Image (cartoon, grey):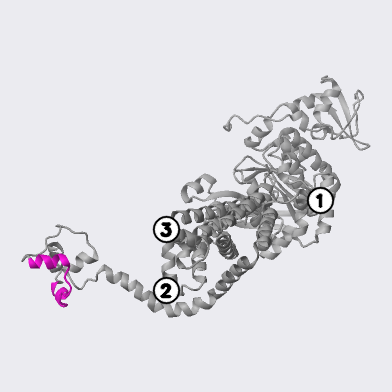
Amino acid sequence: MTQTMVSLRGIYKIFGPNDKELLHHVQNGMGKEELMEKYKHILALNNINIDIQAEKITVVMGLSGSGKSTLIRHLNRLIEPTEGEICLLGEDLTVLSEVDIRKTRQEMMSMVFQKFALLPHETVLKNVGMPLSVRGMDEADCDKEASKWIDRVGLKGYEDSYPWQLSGGMQQRVGVARALTANTPIMLMDEAFSALDPLIRTDIQDLLLELQKELQKTIIFITHDLDEALKLADYLVILKDGYVVQQGEPQHILMNPNDPYIEDFVSDINRARVLRVRSIMAPLGDGKLPLDAHGEVDVNDTLESMILRSGGDTSHTYVVKDGGKTVGTLDMNELVRALVPRVASETTTRQS
Amino acid sequence: MTLYDKLFSFLGLSDWCKSENKAIISLKDLSAQAAGKEASGPFFPIPSLDNLNESCSRVIKSRDVTNGIEEGFLAAKPALKTVLDPITQPLSWMLDGALWVFESTPWFIMVPILVAISWYASHSRPVSIFVAISIMLLAFVDHYDETMQTLSIVFVCTTISVVFGVPIGIAMSNSDRLQRSLLPLLDLLQTLPTFVYLIPLIFLFSVTESKLYGIAIILYAIVPVIRLTDLGIRLVDYEFIEAANAFGMNDRQKLIRVKLPLALPNIMAGVNQTIMMSLAMVVIASLVSAPGLGVNVLRGIRNLELGVGIIAGIGIVLLAVILDRVSKAALKRIDKTRPKD
């Protein structure tokens, strides 16, 4: 297991003037609707505990109103929690002074916004160099560092353009470049790609994954799109009405949803494209390999590619390799079974 | 006034009322007395001070209220004067100094300078040519000196309004309490009839001092720049403030790098309004010895010299158009957030 970068401990957030007084009601089990009805306060986050692993992409997913944007703003204290601890490498951020939290924001966390939030009166170059100039770095150094990252996100030649001259996708590349220029270990991405159209979104997701392979940042990514979540996530947190419904490795959540809400979610996706061989293979128990194996496959191949390979023949079996090592076997019958969506159980009502 | 007579006696106040003898009687009462009967007014007169006074002489008359205000002001005048006189003295110097500079610079230097300024501000050829033609046109009908006087007053008053107005607007945008307390004052300054500004100022300062009209103009013209600075900063989208916070900007950086540039179009609209309002006030200020085109307008009214008034009026309109076009073109040029046409 890798190192924990940020850990959220018992975070509660209630919006309203008397949040502290009402906290014990929530801790004693009062729900969101009841709090709204009785006290006109909004329960945004309800006992959130998450460990965010260093150098991984943690995706927080939920529908609108689930509190995910509120949650990400707690990490750099753009929003103050009503109760709870936010520990960055063991240091509690909630007790930091105004000056210290500013320093933390400058040096530890950068942020990418859904609506880009680029300064419209500054050029791309100055926008991207902004995190450094805020720290007091001299202009020539800012520009140098900024042009490096502009180049890296594929916007070379647009340094002197103004944001309004760029398309949405390009503007968000500027947003990503700005966050990268800050050179912080943590990147917060608040629905960063939600405002983009699907093709451009795929492009910029690929860009992010490519950069991540190289830079190994701790990324916290907020989204309402499960496909996006599954594409990016090393670790997935699913939020509903302010509480964590399930968190864990995305493949695991997909195979073992523990809540009808999540079953609903996952029933809509293309399972073959998301699930990988490692999630459904039979681990190599006593070292016996099937003699009639039709070939070798990698643990990280998607089921879609397996279907293509087998030509739809469910009688095939394959040997699964991880690197050079044999780790298990894959029966195509198992694969088809895994593709059957887990529907919500009959006793719980489906939310439509 | 029988109704109020009855009211006072019903309240048992007749003795208190009568303790002072009814010295002054209204003309109506007097003629009624001469006719040998009491004046018959309406059955239920409006309960005003004057009407109540007729029934009860202890009640003061409305005239006493206005007298009281005047006396109160006169009593406070020495104190006010000792405080305000030194503070506002630089304004006199600035107005006189600017007037001297504008008047003593020969026209063949002044006109090119003005055209150059409008070119520098607007980078627009039509605007610059318009400025040159307008000033030469006014000079052609021998209104050059008056135009320069008016321009110098507008220049000084607008500058001071911006220098004070923008910081006040910024402070207002930062504090809801300050905004709540200043807004009624700004409303008052904007709605108070412009002549009313002049009355207390005439009491305070001598009419020969130029700061008298300077203060009147500034009080009137500073309002839009304060209002629009406050509004402009408050209208800055929260996403930008949030981004500024997320990258760790302090308050100063937020103001200079985010709030002011994004509020600039609104602030410049306020400056434009301030220029227009000081120009409008210049005419009224000529009542208290402000020099310039306004004097001729006043002459036109006083002596019914139609032609003089109209020429001066057109001169003011031309000046207004010049100042408006130059400041708007300048605004458009510096606003980088929008595509230019």
Residue topped by disc 1: A2
Q: Nearer the viewer, mark 1 or mark 2?
A: 2
| A195 is higher (above) or lower (below) than B284 | above
Chain ID, mark 3: B
Chain ID, mark 2: B
Find residue B154 and report its horizontal and vertical position in percent: 56, 62
CA distance for labels 3 and 1: 88 Å
Residue B250 shows in this picture: no
Q: Quadrant of residue B4?
A: bottom left
Mark sitting earlier along the chain (2/3): 2
Q: Nearer the viewer, mark 3 or mark 1?
A: 3
Q: Secondary structure at mark 1?
A: loop
Circle number at residue B203: 2
Tell me if mark 2 has few (under 14), some (14-19) or many (20+) residues whose alpha carbon lies within 10 angstroms of its own. some
Find residue B34 and report its horizontal and vertical position in percent: 8, 67
Q: Quadrant of residue B298?
A: bottom left
Find residue A152 and report its horizontal and vertical position in percent: 84, 45
Could you tell me the amino acid type at mark 2? Phe
Circle number at residue B301: 3
Chain ID, mark 1: A
Apparent side of residue B84 relative to residue B269 in the rendered image (left or right): left
Tell me if mark 3 has few (under 14), some (14-19) or many (20+) residues whose alpha carbon lies within 10 angstroms of its own. few
Magenta span covers which residues? Answer: B14-34
Question: Are the residues under marks 1 and 2 on the same chain?
Answer: no
Question: Are the residues under marks 3 and 1 on the same chain?
Answer: no
Q: Secondary structure at mark 2?
A: helix
Magenta stretch: residue B23 in it?
Answer: yes
Question: Are the residues under marks 2 and 3 on the same chain?
Answer: yes
Could you tell me the amino acid type at mark 3? Ile
